[in-house]
Amino acid sequence: MTTEHMVHMANQIALFFASYPREEAVAGVTDHFRKSWERRMRDQIKQYVAQGGGGLHDLVQEAVKRLD
Amino acid sequence: MALIHEIDHGTPARIAETLVTLEIDGKQVRVPAGTSIMRAAVSAGVQVPKLCATDSMEAFGSCRLCLVEIEGRSGTPASCTTMAEPGMKVHTQSPKLAKMRRGMMELYISDHPLDCLTCAANGNCELQDMAGVVGLREVRYGFDGENHFKKSEKDESNPYFTFDPAKCIVCSRCVRACEEVQGTFALTIDGRGFGSKVSAGGGLFLDSECVSCGACVQACPTATLIEKTVVEKGQGEHSIITTCAYCGVGCSFKAEMQGSEIVRMVPYKDGKANHGHSCVKGRFAWGYTTHKDRILKPMIRAKITDPWREVSWEEAITYAATEFKRIQAKYGKDSVGGITSSRCTNEETFLVQKMVRAAFGNNNVDTCARVCHSPTGYGLKITLGTSAGTQDFDSVEAADVILVIGANPTDAHPVLASQMKRRLRQGARLIIVDPRRIDLVRSPHVLADYHLPLRPGTNVAMINALAHVVVTEGLVNEAYVKERCDLAAFEQWRKFVAEERNAPEAVEQITGVPAADVRGAARLYATGGNAAIYYGLGVTEHSQGSTMVMGMANLAMATGNIGRRGVGINPLRGQNNVQGSCDMGSFPHEFSGYRHVSDDAVREMFEEAWRVTLQGEPGLRIPNMLDAAVDGTFKGLYIQGEDIVQSDPNSQHVTAGVAAMECVVVQDLFLNETASFAHVFLPGSSFLEKDGTFTNAERRISRVRKAIPPMSGLADWEITMKLSQALGYPMKYGHPSEIMDEIARLTPTFAGVSYEKLEELGSVKWPCNEKAPEGTPIMHVSQFVRGKGRFMITEFVPTDERSTDRFPLILTTGRILSQYNVGSQTRRTANNVWHDEDVLEIHPFDAENRGIQDGGLVSLASREGEITLRARISERMQPGVVYTTFHHAVTGTNVVTTEFSDWATECPEYKVTAVQVRPAKRPSEWQEHHREIRRQTTQILGETSPTKQPRT
């Protein structure tokens, strides 16, 4: 998956949960990644965040850090 | 085995609390008040002669054959139009009645050709039957006088049935069927008295408003309207009940046969989804099952540029399994996957996902619901607790307000649309939310109270505006919400939608819909009585598809419109078994019954049953598989009954994905577009060739019964078993019923389902278990499946697909009545008469601005690609929006659609693509390239002529 596509998809998820209180929103994004994204995709976004995660919504940044 | 004949009760059933007891020919019978004497007589085992009456429509009282005598009353009233009354004593036979009936029959027959022995209806003609019943022995009037049968000309214009006025007795059953059953009003009786004749708008059937549903043919008591297959082949000698393999309505049909040859498909009156009605696809478009393009032998090839080589089943299966094992050994366990089919049975779908999880050892399984109703599953599960619609189809009969959002039922779910239109003719109110002026907005005796023609991509803004009116004008059903919903979530939602930015006046600039109309529609929905939402892919195929599903659930909960007859949220499923394929665990994150693979208890149950260790984390979805293939980590794919190259968005990306794989196995009826990129082709079986079940949009599980043997020798479930065996994971089932038994053991909502129960009940709606042994017509009756209904905040987020100066128009795609999905079935039938190419509908204003002529070739270009097709100038469109279908592979509609998708499920955003349209002179580069690719990739070794070349 291209980085651009991944960032877009992840930010879309964040925009849905952004309406909720911060903690609930981060938990929602994390749970969504866990339950819907395959390992390769999770690895890709974890790696991207580790490299700075440019362009990612801050909810995504925080959620990804909570992934195993 | 014999032909199945349903009992014709003459007039429709009545439902009433009061029962009426009367005596007919000395037999006592009790019937609901309002029942006709004719129907009561049938209940008493007495058949009153009749011609103009049939129980699919209201009594007409014209043929005068059903006359009876009632003690204490003078005259001989018609039993079809006379209601049963308490204490009545009715006589259906007397010398006087017999004389009158013979006299009537004499008149009928004096104007009817006496060609019974050579007539196509011979043996299945009510006129012939009645002549026998009344004892007609002579026609005193002769046949030389003025008549209709000597000068009439047949109308053969319809590809599926003939209209022969010579045989018409002007009983009006066809006209009434068109009105009452189908709701199209295409037929009428022209003229008066002796000059009366059935007319399709004064011209040919094909040129009329007729939608070829077949209701008139079915209603005709003579050979006036009759199937051409019956004319050609004769009457069937046995029949079997099965379920249609087209849309998600799931109509029951009688497949009438001569030996192993289908003669005709007749809608089954006891079918609980269709009640004896049908559409042009299910009724007539079954010829693809024996089309010459069917591939009947397995084929393999090392490279997609090689010609196909026909091989034995054993060689093909061994080759596929060896390749998958090689790929997994080289690239890892997760480098392969499978796609289940929404056109195949529940049992076949269950086996494919089982094979992927147990034999491949991963969760890389997905299904075509990914590209249609995956947001329905997501949105309804979060809010209500289960991934399915809430009602049965019959619920619409109790709806007072029908809200149709992003669906076009008359085209995509025609039989349900007929039921809906019947309710609307009875006075139910109608709100339509759709960018296009679909037929339902205004059709004979149907007029929408509100049509909200919103801009594509603004559904969520619209649903929030509707909810805003409900919340701010005091229209919330507070008692319902307090009793049944999560109050904290409700208060959070109430506060959100009440914000001024969600008011219709604020949203008007987003949706383009006048605020007053939105307010009116919201008030009607909230206060008009039972309000039911029906929706389709115009809801789900958006970047906020799942959000919109939640928004509709919010609205229905807030107004108390879930949990009883006449209300609810009703997803109109596109394909015959989309609901079933989802139920069966086709998604990469869920086992059957929508249980997440990370649930240890559930996974352990499957591990114990399947004697294998299963992965506990989600696998790849279809778009993820394609991404991974392009990345080089996904190399093998088993595809059962799905054509992702034609149906999925951004064709260039899809073809790049499949082209990057080392083993693509396509199991299908035809060499479809995806087969161009396949290395193994396994010939599949049509719905007529196997046993199984389909689950329709109302969760109804119906039997699919084998009418003829599999033409390739194996049914699809048997092919999957063989492949699994070759992969080293043997599955042993002697019959699909054994697969269903396993599904029932492992899936709580299916615990009570078995073939025995389906034989007993005809069909059953899940959940079917100890709590609901006969199934569940309506869900969430006393409480929501998840306990308390959960309101979700549905912030409107505009799609990132924006129109610009370069791409100023918005394209939405969809389907039409006569074609189905990628068209591989319907394009191989006479349905092409109505739609032999995809066309671009464009508003006159946009056409004129661009110098586009009606019927002229135009280029349709997006950021992703460009195609050409013909334009149709239509005021159904709003300015700025164009529309086309994706039924014809040569069009390549998905060359222009984008990879934008629903945030939660990755359901593609087919409904919003920024495009430009301009006049064109020749096919696009893609189309030229496609033609060449097809030529190169569909050759079969040893075939000198392209007899098996797919029509694309």
Image: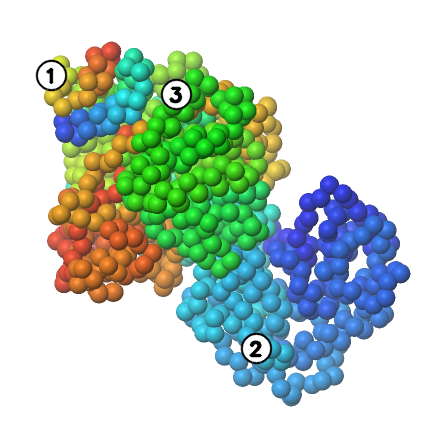
In terms of depth relative to the viewer, which is nearer, B826 or B40?
A: B40
Mark 1 crowd level (few <14, some 14–19, many ≥20, 10 Å Cα): few
Quarter of the image with the C terminus of chain B is bottom left
Position in image of residue B404 (x %, y %):
43, 44
Position in image of residue B448 (x %, y %):
45, 51
Label 3 sits on residue: B492
Give the vertical position of B876 relative to B799 (above or below): below
For image coordinates 66% across by 63% down, the residue present is B60
Same subunit, tags 3 and 2: yes
Label 2 sits on residue: B191
Position in image of residue B416 (x %, y %):
49, 48
Which callout, 1 or 3, points to the residue nearer the camera? Answer: 3
Q: Which mark is residue B106?
A: none
Q: Element type at marker 2? A: loop
Q: Give the side of residue B273 with respect to residue B53, left or right.
A: left
Tags 3 and 2 in contact by the CB under 8 Å rule? no
Amino acid under disc 2: Gly
Same subunit, tags 1 and 3: no
Label 1 sits on residue: A52
In terms of depth relative to the viewer, which is nearer, B776 or B610?
A: B776
- Is residue B912 visible in the rendered structure shown here? yes
Give the vertical position of B818 relative to B618 (above or below): below
Chain containing mark 3: B
Give the vertical position of B570 relative to B42 (above or below): above
